[in-house]
Structure formats: C-alpha cells, structure tokens
Amino acid sequence: MSDASQGLRLYNTLTRTKEAFVPIDPLNVRMYVCGPTVYDFAHIGNARPVIVFDVLFRLLRHLYSETHVTYVRNITDVDDKINARALRDFGGEIASGALSLNEAIRRVTEKTADQFHKDVAVLGCLEPTVEPRATEFVEPRADGKADMITLIQSLIARGHAYVAAGEVLFDTGSMPDYGQLSKRNLDEQQAGARIAVDAHKKNPQDFVLWKLSSPEEPGWNSPWGRGRPGWHIECSAMSAAYLGKVFDIHGGGLDLIFPHHENEIAQSRCAHGTDVMANIWMHNGFLQVEGQKMSKSLGNFYSINELLETETFGGRKWPGEVLRLAMLMTHYREPIDFSVRKLEEAENTLRKWKRAADLAPVAEGQLPVEVIDALSDDLATYAAFQVLTQLAGEAADGNQAAAALKASLLFLGFDVASADIDEGGVAKAIANRLALIAAKNWTEADRIRDELLAQGVQLKDGKNPATGERITTWEVKR
C-alpha cells in the first residue's frame, strides 16, 4: 500500500463532508457502483458515472495495489419492460420449458449489454472486478452468496417487511432514521403523501420488495407466490454477495440518492443488523446537453454509440478519449454542460498533451506525485490536468517532464502511442512479478507493473481454468 493513500479524501453524501478515506480492510478495498439497465443502448449521461468511478478505481489500485481492490458494477436485467419483451419474444419456449426465464432475458439484453461493454472500453474504462447480473441473484444460489428472496425473508423475520395485497413491502416506519442519505424527514413525507392511493401500505412511503406476476408475466417462484423483485433489492443482494454486509464505497449518479440508494441502505442495514451499508457514498452531478436537460422530446438524447459512430452531434464523430476528457474537465460532483464547444476544447487539450508526451522515451517515466495528490483530494481532476498542462509546457525530447506526462496520460486512461515492445523483456518482467506475488512482495510486484504501464504495456491477471494458478497476459495500451 502506498503511503500516499493516507491523504485520500472523498466527499461523503451521507455526512455532507469531505472525509479521510480509511478502508475497512486495506488488503481488500471494496467499491460498488450502480450499473446500467440494459433495456436500450447507454446514453451519454450513463457514461459519466462509469468514467468517474473508473478514475477512482484506478486511483485505489495505485494506492492499495490492484490485487487489493474489488470493484463491483452490476447490470440490471430485471425490469418490467425487459421481462415483457422476453415473454413476447420467447413466451413459447419459456412455457414449454425449453428456455428458462433467465435465459430468455439474457437473449433480450445480450445486444445492449455487449454494446455497453464496447462503448465503455472505447471510453478508456477498465473492466470492473466483478459484473453481476440481477437475474442471477433473485433465487437462493448454490454457492451460498446473497440473493434477493433470502434478503426479503430476513427483512420479514426481523419485522422490517410485511405482505399486503400480493406484495412484500418494506416497512419504513420500522426504521427510525430512514432518510439519512437524502435528508428527507419521514414525518414531512407522510404529511405530504396521498395515502389513499396505496391503502394497503402501513406508511405511504413504504416500497416494494416483491410483487406478484400474473400468468402472462415473467416471474420467479417465491414463498409469496410467483413474482419478481422490486428495483432496490437487487443492488442490496449483489453488493452483499461480493462485498459483504458493510463495504467501503458506494457510488452512482445524483439522481439515485432518492429513492434508490436510500432504500438500498434501509434494506441492507435492516436485513443485516448493521449501522451502515457503505461507509462512504459518492454521487456524480447531473448532465445537460447544450444547456438543456437531455430528453428525446427535445431531440438532444444521445447514446454513447451515436457519439462514437455517427455524425449526429456537432456534425462529426467523436473519439472516446475526447468524450472521456470532456467528462473529467468538470469536477465529478458539479453539473456538466455537455456541448460541442467542450468537446472541441477537450480535443485541443488532448492533442497538445500527446504531442508533448510523444517526446518521451518508451522505457522511462514515473507517475508524478502531484497528479496523485490532486486526485486524492476528492478526485480533483481539474487540478490533475493543470499538472499535465505544466508538464506539457516543460516537455522536451527525452526529458523527465515528457516521460512523466506520458505516464500520467496512461494512468488516467488516455490513448498514448507506444514504440515497439520488447516482448522478451515483457515476458521476463511478468515472470519476475509472478514470483514476487507468490512471495507476497506486493511493493516490488506493483513497481514492475507500473514500469510496464509506463512503457505502454497493460498487464491482465487471471486464472488458469484447468489448474487455478495465476496467469498474466499483456496488451499494448494505446
């Protein structure tokens, strides 16, 4: 673990303050971020949290070592629109038993999920450590990991949920401090609610954990009848499955604070009997397009893929790294106006940085501490970019500033062309690193990884499916 990690400070939505980050376990730093609902192609607003938390993921890996950080980003494929489409397209196969509901949903969502993965890769984002699908966590699992039905059963047993009118509902009245994240007063919510609309609820703000499915609707068998889960319980199950009852960081967009994240907290705390679900809650700000709220009715609703592959915005296609930089030029907590002018500014800035970085020798370059210090101050990307601009101004053929700039660009996920790679040297370095990992010499192992990254070589760790042994592959990071 780097000493610089002692300086990491993050803004916590739960406390409305910037706090020193102290992981529960420095050898297993855990982060969960709400991922896409794969009913349609991801839009540019969806790209912002993916990019923001990719930067945080990279920073945590640098501070604590890549082997000591677990990043979970889910895919929501339990959704009434998705379910209805699965029934429409594959109802016969489901009814005959030739296709399970999960398999039908997977077929419906495969195209959009695949496109999402391709899009965010072009945006320079690393893959998360784990990417669970909601459909795989509805029913009790053979591996014993947390699931939605078991969590709901626990909430009922603990007196925090009840069955009414064919639904299982969370009883917000059973949680005295419900509303801490959004700072919504429970009494005020009750006073302003239209109680008659949902007369079967004990409290007007009680929310659905499980709802019954009609014979025509897709569903799963449960103790309360054949049905499907509510939206919020999905993330409570998937985060617990891979990160435990309490973890370090939960992230997402500002629009998720209420009701989604508020209700996640309620479910998880009450099911597990914990004081918190996650220690730090982080939220990125809203996105507008050319000064207006993004809306299909206004004609300013753009998918990531449209911006990358078509000429619908500003009359041209935009490189993924330009979209990435434009997103990061505004602090993640601030609202962002996504505009052609901002993209042009990002493109010009990136061009200047790359010209300077091209002066760097391949085998040199250390990540400047000033860049890490800036990012460690609640992901102050603008301050980090000021360091990059200064390095670009100081860059000369083969000098330290050019090399540091190149290392910084690579670290931040930007494309930097690399010279020919000494494949034999890379293989030797990988072998040395694996030996160091086996000896638990994480510092030296990380040093080799960082040196290779500075040369444009990205390592990928995995397991041999036959033996279970660690294996490492590599690719040129362009």
Image: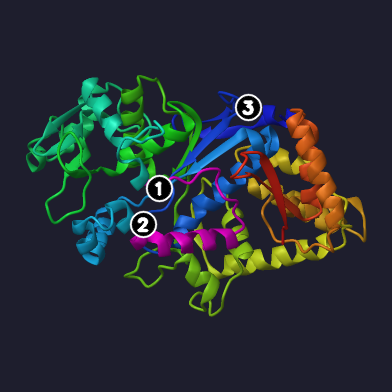
Check if mark 3's residue and mark 1's residue have beta carbons within 8 Å: no
Residue sticking out furthest to the front: 466
Residue type at tag 2: Arg
Which quadrant would the N terminus be assigned to in this image?
top right
Q: Which mark is residue 27?
A: 3
**Point 39% across, 20% down: residue:** 274
Q: Label 1: state its secondary structure.
A: loop
Residue type at tag 3: Leu
From which residue to which does the magenta span run? 106-134
Q: How is the image coloured?
A: rainbow
Which quadrant would the C terminus be assigned to in this image?
bottom right
The residue tagged 1 is 133
- Which one is closest to the eye, mark 1 or mark 2? 2
Q: Dot 1 surroundings within 10 Å: few (below 14), some, or many (20 or more)?
A: some
Looking at the rendering, which quadrant does residue 187 occupy?
Answer: top left
Residue type at tag 1: Arg
